[in-house]
Amino acid sequence: MTPFFTLYRLFLRNQLTTGRLVLIGALTAIALIIGFAVGTSDPFDPVDAATGIVWFFGIGLMVPIISLVLASSALGDLQADETLVYLWHRKTPRWQLAAAAWLAPATIAVPATAIGLSLCAVLVAGFNAKVFFGTLLAVVVAAIVYSAAFTLLGLLFRRALIIGLMYLFIWEQFMARAGGGAATLSINTYPSSILAKITDIELFLADRSIATGVIVPIVISLLALFFTSWRLDRMDVA
Amino acid sequence: MSLPPAPAASAWPPSDATIVAYDVSKSFGSLVAVSSVSIAVQPGVSALLGPNGAGKSTLLRMLSGQIRPASGKVWVAGGDPRADAEARNRIGLVPQQDGVFEREKALDVVRLAAILSQLDNVEERARWALGLVELDPDMTRPVGAFSKGMRQRVKIAQALVHDPLVLMMDEPLNGLDPRQRKQMISLFHELGNRGKTVLVSSHVLEEVERLGSHVIVISKGRLAAQGDFRGIRGLMDNQPLRFRIVCDKARLVAAQLVAQSTVIGCNVESDTQIEITTADARTFRRSIAAICREHDARLEEIAPLDEDLESVFRYLVGAGG
């Protein structure tokens, strides 16, 4: 077994706690209930309704919250219980440690959110290819980029969960909606733009192209990975 | 033995030193944890001794590369352990904290260490390392369910799995029962005899006495002494020391002791107990038995009152300035 896969497996096992599984299950259940409720209420424009739900509840809340809870704990928990030193002190390259810590939460967050929100979209709009694949791509991109950003956050701050929630609710949900400039600095803008462009539904401040919606999150993820590795290399470890 | 050592450029560090720290300091905010410490550790077992809060763990963390010194240089097993992954991999580290991966089995923890050290024969090495610390590799309980002593042994096993050149252990005997302590100390000696550099931190003087003759004494973040343990104890003997004597003719024995030139203070505390202060502990120890014999007094106990660790440090810090 390679060091990278061993680290990935360890992080993955650490992620799977009852509390986190309950949170994922609860948010998925809420998504399905909303989808069922709206779908059976015969909406005027099902595509518009499905896109709106995926945008507001899915990309705005469910994906970032699940990613935050999982990713901030990947390295954060090891720092808190002081077991990081057992991984850090070995000769495995820092980037492998950072990448494994990012991929483990993403491995759970991507399917957990993509399946739940795609089903939610189907419940509202039936199988509409644009909504289904738009949801799928937007959610996958969102889960990957949020996981990368919150893995770094978990390494940087002891109270990463609170800081992450403040970022989501104060910056993304409030400040970033003040205008285009602020929206550029919000992760939410990019997966929302993917969803808006693919479904042809106009979403507030989600006006980037699909290419920008995909490339910028990839760049953010790689930067987060780079800074996580850099921080691991520079930090003092208890 | 030096108090404190002043490294001379030509003679220091020794050519066979595997751990060298030169003028290292570290502060946390306004707290100076380690201040201008220079040490050199050669193969064999060495003890890093100091009371709680003296700066032992901070120094050990700088030596292992866990924390960066604010100033000074660290060199371990051919490189800077912070910058050089290969040098770091030549160190086996037993950190102070109790936590090991709670949900994993002992074999998995040690296997993980072996894989991350990129060993070929992972399973074999992991079982070998657990065998060294007398743990059953096939235990199915997770480490979280282990006693403190068993966890400590898992930590030692993961540090040994890659057969490191240098072993750094922060209070590794904590939580072990007397039999396990004895077994671990003999394992450390065996490793030392095989040419490994074994550096063990402890705040228990008795433990250090059994660990090895070379000690590095840290007090209040400074190097208080470095050298042979017996030398430090010898220095202690030349200082005024207090003893409690328990015998059945305390007043008679006290009168005889006061007449001795080496006794500079005497307090009869009861009919059976005296507390004396002597300027020459060795001579006093020899004379007390003779006095008791001469006056047919039954000597039950001579207990040094100043050989606890705090007294050693009080003296060393005073002597070292």
Image: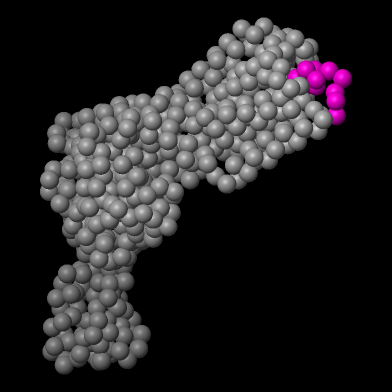
The answer to which of B139 and B231 lies nearer the viewer is: B139
Q: Residue at x 31, y 42 (%)?
A: B111
Q: Position of residue B264 (x, y in %)?
A: 27, 73
Residue A171, position in %: x, y? 72, 24
Image: B32 above or below B152: above
Taking the image as shown, residue A134 lies to the left or right of residue B84, namely right
Measured from the top left, where is residue B237 in percent x and y? 21, 64
**Lateral position of residue B141 relative to residue A75, left or right:** left
Where are the magenta residues, as a range? A41-54
Residue A210 location, quadrant: top right
Quarter of image, res A126: top right
The picture places residue B105, in percent across and down from the top left corner, at 37, 49
Which residue sits at x=45%, y=26%?
A99
Q: Nearer the viewer, residue A173 or B246?
A: A173
* Magenta segment main secondary structure: helix
Above or below, A92 against B159 in this view is above
Corner quadrant of residue A145: top right
Residue A46 forms part of the magenta stretch:
yes
Q: Is residue B319 left or right of residue A236?
A: left
Residue toward you, B154 or B230: B154
> Does B97 lie within the magenta span?
no
For the point 17% across and 48% down, which residue is it? B191
User: Residue at point 77% right, 12% down?
Assistant: A201
Is residue B70 at all visible to an observer of this figure?
no
Q: Is residue A47 visible?
A: yes
